[in-house]
Amino acid sequence: MNKKLVGSAVVGAAVLAIVAAQFLSGPDAAPAAAPPSTPPTTMPTATTLPYQETKEIYDFPAQPGSETGGFDFEIPVPTGWTATHDKDRATYRSGELVLETDRVPITQEDALSALQAIAKASPHPGTVAKHADVGYDEAAEWDYSYVRDGVLRQVNLVGVGVGDVLITIRYEAPQPEFLSHVNVLADALEVSSAG
């Protein structure tokens, strides 16, 4: 038999087998596995969820006789966390992690004095110190811990002086988990103002 004819028959049979397998497997056949990809450097978790669209907004209307218009103070908050609202206080929870924002009227001249007054009235001793400005506003920070249900919880509260109010942003977690999720607070401090 002719070697060219045998070779052509073998190639033709192979092509026919491949085409038949594609048609006979039907539309429900599993797709070919994708090639392995390089894993991302950080895997998304409950605390690294997108913050771009979810914001807690505090409205500051224009004051009568003011030359400038009002504005909104916008705080990025975790997308997908359970949210509850009670007047100006907003609480976001994911398991034992808590991010809370609030608007507190103040009579003090600066954020540090205002936060010191709040801390003094609290049953939780801690440290109050100046914090780097948040946005364009001065800020102070209060660090403390307390025990709830036998678990030591760590709290970091940043107060931002905006006009005659203190916007507070509080992050709380069980102490063993506090540092591994502190990016929740860092993300929330990326505030913006919209007029």
Image: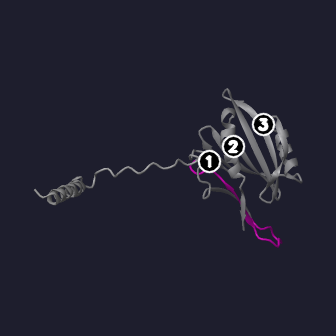
The one nearer the camera, 105 or 133, is 133
Residue 144: assigned label:
3
Q: Left or right? Give the position of 36 relative to 154.
A: left
Q: Which sits earlier in the primary sequence, circle 3 or circle 2?
A: 3
Residue lying at 80% horizontally and 42% vertically, measured from the top left: 142
Distance CA(mark 3)–CA(mark 2): 14 Å
Q: Which sits earlier in the primary sequence, circle 1 or circle 3?
A: 1
Residue type at tag 2: Val
Work out which quarter of the rendered image holds the N terminus and state it.
Answer: bottom left
Q: Is residue 87 visible?
A: no
Callout 3: 10 Å neighbours few (<14), some, many (20+)?
some
Q: Which residue is mark 2?
A: 182
Callout 2: 10 Å neighbours few (<14), some, many (20+)?
some
Q: Which residue is mark 1?
A: 84
Q: Which sits earlier in the primary sequence, circle 1 or circle 2?
A: 1
The one nearer the camera, 189 or 168, is 189
Residue type at tag 3: Tyr
Q: Position of residue 192 (x, y in %)?
A: 72, 60
Residue lying at 82% horizontally and 51% vertically, measured from the top left: 132
Can residue 79 be found in the magenta stretch?
yes
Helix or strand or loop: what does disc 1 sit on?
strand
Q: What stretch of residues is rendered in magenta?
A: 61-80
Front position among marks 1 and 2: 2
Q: Farthest residue in the top direction?
A: 150
Residue lying at 62% horizontally and 54% vertically, measured from the top left: 51
